[in-house]
Image (spheres, rainbow, N blue to C red):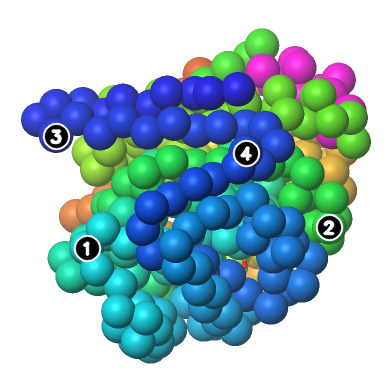
Amino acid sequence: MIVPIELIPPQPVKYDITIDKLPKLTFNTKVVVVTNPTVAGFHLETLLSHIQSPELHVVTIPDGEQYKTLQTVESILNECFEHKLDRKSLLIAFGGGVIGDMTGFTASLYQRGIDFIQIPTTLLSQVDASVGGKTGVNNKYGKNLIGAFYQPKAVYINPEFLKTLPKREFAAGFAEIVKMAVMFDREYFDFLKNADLADEAQLKETIRRSVELKAWVVNQDEKEAGIRAVLNYGHTFGHVVENETDYTTYLHGEAVAIGMVMANALAVELGLMSEEEADEVKALLKTQELPTTYCIDDVDAFYEHFFLDKKSANNSIKFILPKKIGSHKIVQDIDEAVVKKVLRRFGE
Ligand code: NAD
Ligand code: MG
C-alpha cells in the first residue's frame, strides 16, 4: 500500500510511504542503520536480511528519551565520519520516535544533509513521528527545542514489528490515532470503535488512515504555520500533565489521552461538543486501557503551566478543540475563569 506525499511549492518534496511487509531494499551507496539494543534484539536480523548495500554498518545508541540529546547525535555523526560516509550515503532510522527524530536530525547535519529513510517500529512512530519531517533532540530547556524540518526519502511501515511492542507503548500510539480521528474524521472514529487491532488487516487499515491524515495535514502546512497545529489537540493539557509528573508517570500518549479528555471538557463547556460525544471519546480511549482521569491539585499552577509551552505565542493560549467528533476549532483567548472552572472538575 502506498500513500504518496507531496509537499507544497516552492520546494516540492515527495516520498513514498509503504504500509506492508518490509520489501527488499537495494542501495548502491554506503548505508548506516541507527537503532537501539531493544529494537535490534527483536528485529535487526530481519532488517539486515532485507538490505543490500556495498557497505552496511549498524550504529546502536542507548534506549530512552533521556538519550535524545545533542551528545547522542554527535556520537552518531562521529560514527558516520569513522565509516567515511559521503554525501550520497544513506541513514536508516530503525526504531521508535526517539530513533527516528535523532536519525533524521543527524542526516540533516552530516555534510549539510544526506538522505535518510524511516523504518518505524512503534505504533506511535508508524502513525505519527515517521511522517512529516520534524526531527530533533531535547535539551535542558525542553523537549524537541533543537531540530530541523527534514523529510525522509521514504517511510517503510511494517505492522509486523509491532508484535513485540509492550501493550502500554501500543496504547500510547493509539492515543495519537484517536487524536487524528476526533480532529478530522468521524467515519474513521466509528471504524476505530469497532476495530479489532489484533487483527492484521484492521490494524493495517488503522495505520493507513492515520498516516494518510497526517500526510494530508503536512502537505498543507509543513512548517506548522496553520493546520498542522491541530495535531496538538490534547497536547496543550497533556504537556502540563507530563511536566507536573516529571515525565515519569505517563508515557507521552497517555498524557495526550488525559489531555484530550480535558480539551473535550472545555469543548463541552463552550458548546462545541456534547457530553455524549465527550463520553464516546473517553470510551474509545478506554478500549486500550488509556488513562482518562487526572487529579489537578493546584488549578492556578496548572493554568500557569500553559504559558511555559513553546506553542503558546504572545502569552495567549491557543486551544485546539473538537467541534463535534471529526472536526476541530482553534480557539484563542478563552476567558481564564472558564478554563479554570473546567480544570477544577479534575481536582475532585
Ligand atoms: P520510543 O522511541 O522511546 O520507543 C518506545 C520504547 O519501545 C523504547 O523503549 C523502544 O526501544 C521500544 N521499542 C521500539 N520498537 C519496538 C518493538 N517493535 N518491539 C519492542 N519494543 C520496541 O518512543 P515512541 O513512542 O516511538 O516515540 C516517542 C518520541 O517520538 C518522542 O521523543 C517524541 O518527541 C517523538 N515524536 C516525534 C514526532 C515527529 O513528528 N517527529 C511526533 C511524535 C512523537
Ligand atoms: Mg504527540
- Label 4 to label 1: alpha-carbon separation: 25 Å
Q: Categorize mark 4 by other alpha carbons within 10 Å: few (<14), some (14-19), many (20+).
A: few
Q: Is 88 a magenta residue?
A: no
The disc labelled 4 sits on which kind of residue?
Pro
Q: Is 190 a magenta residue?
A: yes
Disc 4 to disc 1: CB gap under 8 Å: no
The disc labelled 3 sits on which kind of residue?
Gln
Q: Name the residue at 18% across, 70% down.
A: 111
Q: Secondary structure at mark 1?
A: loop
The disc labelled 2 sits on which kind of residue?
Thr
Instruction: Say which residue label 1 marks.
Output: 87
Disc 2 to disc 1: CB gap under 8 Å: no
Q: Earlier in the sequence, mark 2 or mark 3?
A: 3
Mark number displayed over residue 23 = 4
Q: Categorize mark 2 by other alpha carbons within 10 Å: few (<14), some (14-19), many (20+).
A: few
Instruction: Say which residue label 3 marks.
Output: 11
Q: Earlier in the sequence, mark 2 or mark 1?
A: 1
Q: Secondary structure at mark 3?
A: loop
